[in-house]
């Protein structure tokens, strides 16, 4: 065998074995793109299968695209500290309810409402969650056991994006828009579509394939050889 080819084949085999041995992602990863910041959320597929499947149904149907964060409680330090979305779509300057599927059961799980987690919002009935979700800006132990926590924001940059949303000033515009908007975050003190916290899109982040990992490994190895 060509002396130059043998080391390359050996390198390819090593990278393939390394890629095959890498653990699978712990859960599905979704990316939120907002006008305040972008962040990833890892979902608890195994622990909360019903809740995650419901959430991904809305994600895959693009029903969270162009929705808003319509509620924030961070202005009140004595209250729970959350930002809530998934309920209202900004379309042509109007706020319209997101089209929802039938409500799901309140799925029990071990995850708690610690800072940076995402949970399903619901009404007074335990089995009333549909599309709305909230992020815990700070830990909210008072919510434990009453809401399905099904994922967490990834990394310090992700938490910084959640903090940025939580820092947006809140206004009561329930007279103009209805009771659901008594704690509406607005970037500027004017009821204008340009001032809402907009969730531009929510998309599943595909896991890298073995081939992609192999190519990445080869690229890194080649770069390393060039530096020698």
Image: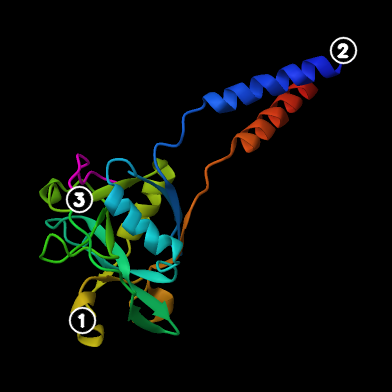
Q: In this view, does 149 lie above or below 85?
A: above
Where the N terminus falls, by quadrant? top right
Element on which disc 3 rests:
loop
Q: Position of residue 160 (x, y in %)?
A: 39, 49
- Which numbered disc flags the more N-terminal residue, 1 or 3? 3
- Which numbered disc flags the more N-terminal residue, 1 or 2? 2
Q: In this view, does 68 lie above or below 38?
A: below
- Quadrant of res 176: bottom left
- Which numbered disc flags the more N-terminal residue, 3 or 2? 2
| Callout in the foreground (1, 3) | 3
Q: Which residue is drawn at 12% across and 48% down?
A: 145
List the residue tagged with mark 2: 3
Tell me which secondary structure the magenta stretch mostly adopts.
loop
Q: In this view, does 98 lie to the left or right of 20?
A: left
Q: Position of residue 130 (x, y in %)?
A: 26, 65
Q: What is the span of residues highlighted in magenta in the rendered image?
A: 107-117
**Marks 3/2: CA–CA distance:** 60 Å
The residue positioned farthest toward the bottom in the image shown:
176
């Amino acid at each position: 065998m060509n002396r130059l080819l043998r080391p390359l084949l050996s390198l390819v085999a090593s990278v393939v074995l390394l890629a095959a041995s890498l653990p699978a992602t712990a859960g599905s990863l979704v990316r939120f793109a907002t006008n305040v910041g972008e962040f990833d959320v890892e979902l608890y597929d195994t622990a909360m299968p019903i809740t995650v499947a419901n959430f991904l149904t809305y994600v895959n149907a693009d029903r969270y695209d162009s929705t808003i964060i319509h509620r924030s409680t961070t202005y009140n330090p004595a209250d729970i500290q959350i930002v809530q979305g998934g309920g209202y779509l900004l379309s042509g300057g109007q706020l319209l309810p997101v089209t929802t599927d039938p409500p799901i059961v309140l799925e029990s799980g071990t995850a708690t409402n610690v800072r940076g987690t995402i949970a399903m919002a619901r009404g007074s009935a335990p089995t009333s969650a549909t599309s709305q979700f909230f992020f815990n800006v700070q830990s909210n132990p008072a919510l434990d056991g009453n809401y399905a926590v099904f994922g967490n924001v990834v990394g310090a940059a992700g938490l910084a994006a959640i903090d940025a949303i939580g820092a947006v000033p809140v206004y009561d515009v329930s007279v103009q828009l209805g009771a659901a908007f008594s704690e509406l975050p607005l970037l500027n003190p004017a009821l204008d579509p340009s001032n809402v916290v907009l969730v531009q899109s929510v998309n599943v982040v595909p896991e890298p394939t073995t081939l992609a990992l192999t190519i990445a490994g080869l690229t890194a190895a080649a770069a390393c050889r060039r530096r020698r």
